[in-house]
Image (cartoon, grey):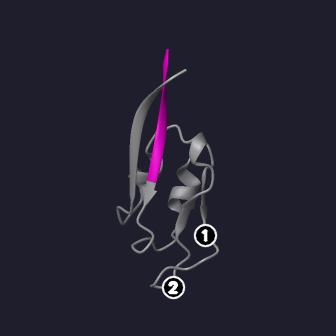
Amino acid sequence: MSKIKGKVLIDRERCKGCDLCVAACPVHILALADQVNARGYHFSTVQQPDSCIGCASCALVCPDSCITVYRQKVEA
């Protein structure tokens, strides 16, 4: 049986740190970074990439389309 694994890519320079993606993630893999981007915002970052289920909730709620989610099948 195959399992779906996700990969989240975040455009750190476009992210304004609104925290919507962090709240939307059902498995709590996202957080705001301690660093800031060139515009002075604490950007979103992936804390636990191996736990991503590929649901794309984070990408759907992002107002600036900074997040892309890829899904791949992994053999269990």
Residue sticking out furthest to the front: 75
Callout 1–callout 2 Cβ contact below 8 Å: no
Q: Earlier in the sequence, mark 1 or mark 2?
A: 1
The residue carrying pointer 1 sits among few (fewer than 14), some (14 to 19) or many (20 or more) residues within 10 Å by Cα, namely some
Label 2 SS:
loop
Amino acid carrying mark 2 in the image: Gly
Q: Quadrant of residue 11?
A: bottom left
Label 1 SS:
loop
* Residue 53 coordinates in the image, percent (x, y): 52, 37
Q: Is residue 74 covered in magenta?
A: no
Height in image: 2 above or below 71? Answer: above
Alpha carbons under labels 1 and 2: distance apart: 12 Å
Q: Is residue 26 visible?
A: no
* Residue 52 coordinates in the image, percent (x, y): 54, 42
Residue bearing the label numbered 2: 40
Q: Is residue 2 covered in magenta?
A: yes
* Residue 68 coordinates in the image, percent (x, y): 38, 53
Q: Does residue 3 appear left or right of residue 48 in this picture? A: left
Q: Magenta segment range? A: 1-8
